[in-house]
Amino acid sequence: MISSKTQAKPQRNNFDFWLIATTAVLVMIGLLAIYDASVVAAARDFGDKLYYFKNQVIWVFLGLGALVFFSFFNYQKLLKASPFILFLSIILLIAVLIPQIGSEIYGARRWISVSSFTFQPSEFAKLSLILYLSLIIAKFENFKFKLSDIFIVFFLPVLAVLGLIVLQPDLGTAIIIGAISLLIYFVGKAPLWHFAVAIPAFVLSAVISILAAPYRIVRLKSFFDPSYDPQGASYHINQILSAISSGGLFGVGIGASRYKFASIPEVQTDAIFAIFVEELGFVGALFLISVFLFLIAKAITIAKEAEDISGKVLAAGIAGLIAVQSLFNIASNVALVPLTGVPLPFISHGGSSLVVTMASIGILINIKRTQ
């Protein structure tokens, strides 16, 4: 009996090979997709067709550093530091709204530039909030959930983060963070009747945010009626749908996309899935979605196998982050939800998203390794 336990323990401490391998596959697909989709825009805007690709390669190495670091840094220590980490992320969310600090692009103030690097505080806020909420839920495990108490320590910080992100404005990210927060609350075994209050409040807040901004109403109109303003509000989604439909079953071939030639705005970010499907078709889309599902399933397995509540909730929160964001991006590309500019994890160009996602994978590895 003793020898069997000693043999089982090292096995449990091993790194999750399939989690690491799947992450590597997605990172490589992302680099190839960015190179392929962005060559035209990069040559036009920067005179260097490899501009976006080289930029993403730098972020891949930074992300790899984050993954390795968090694989070995005990997640319990990270959870203890999470109130400070969340406080720092809120300071950054406030700072990005200050004109002298935050960079405004296309009417949105979501980025902070430091030298030649630009990062997005809202991406950092996603992970910092997951860490903090996991800590709070773990502390409430043995106590009775009182809505007044949980509102102060759980929902109030969530509302603060959501409010600051909506001001940028970035409603898509705010919706994702709100959904993940409710997921963590559910996984933490909160009373179901609390959701009768939380979910309607969340939906009502999203509706008010849409109605308060005329451009969001226009975007919603184009979502329900793609023929509405075809050269304006509906242009982006119509081009994306045309690119996807032209891919057919097997695609037009790698590198043969026609829609990357200035047809789709910001093709290397939120619409990169469309170019991927155009070139590799339904089969390619099915493969990519299968890889994402496998990664999410591995994260859920780690959550189920975690021995403490904080590890379970943290792993579930990270699984939710990858799942919700992937679903939201792909759904927006096939017109199931309005376009909001949410990146596809690992695949879309964007350093902040990539580093945070790879850091999250590192935390999953750590949870698995230390159980």
Image (spheres, grey):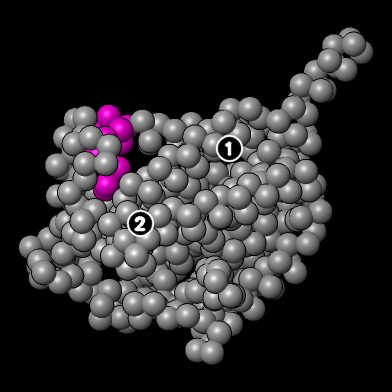
Characterize the local packing of mark 1: few (<14), some (14-19) or many (20 or more) Cα atoms within 10 angstroms.
many
Count of labels shown?
Answer: 2
Of residues 114 and 356, the one nearer the viewer is 114
* Residue at the (49%, 34%) spot, across then down: 25
Q: In 3D space, how far apart are the residues under numbered discs 1 and 2 (Cα atoms)?
A: 36 Å
Q: What stretch is highlighted in magenta?
A: 274-286
Disc 1 or disc 2, which is closer to the eye?
2
Q: Is mark 2 on a helix, strand or loop?
A: loop
The disc at residue 299 is 1
335 to 119, vertically: above or below: above
Q: What kind of secondary structure does the magenta stretch mostly adopt?
A: helix
* Residue at the (15%, 42%) spot, across then down: 245
23 to 227, vertically: above or below: above
Residue 265, how many percent across, how many down? 26, 63
Q: Quadrant of residue 166?
A: bottom left
Magenta run includes residue 285: yes
* Residue at the (59%, 64%) spot, across then down: 124
Residue 354, how many percent across, how many down? 53, 53
Q: In which quarter of the image is the C terminus?
A: top right
The reply to whether residue 333 is in sight is yes
User: Which residue is the extreme one toward the front?
Assistant: 47
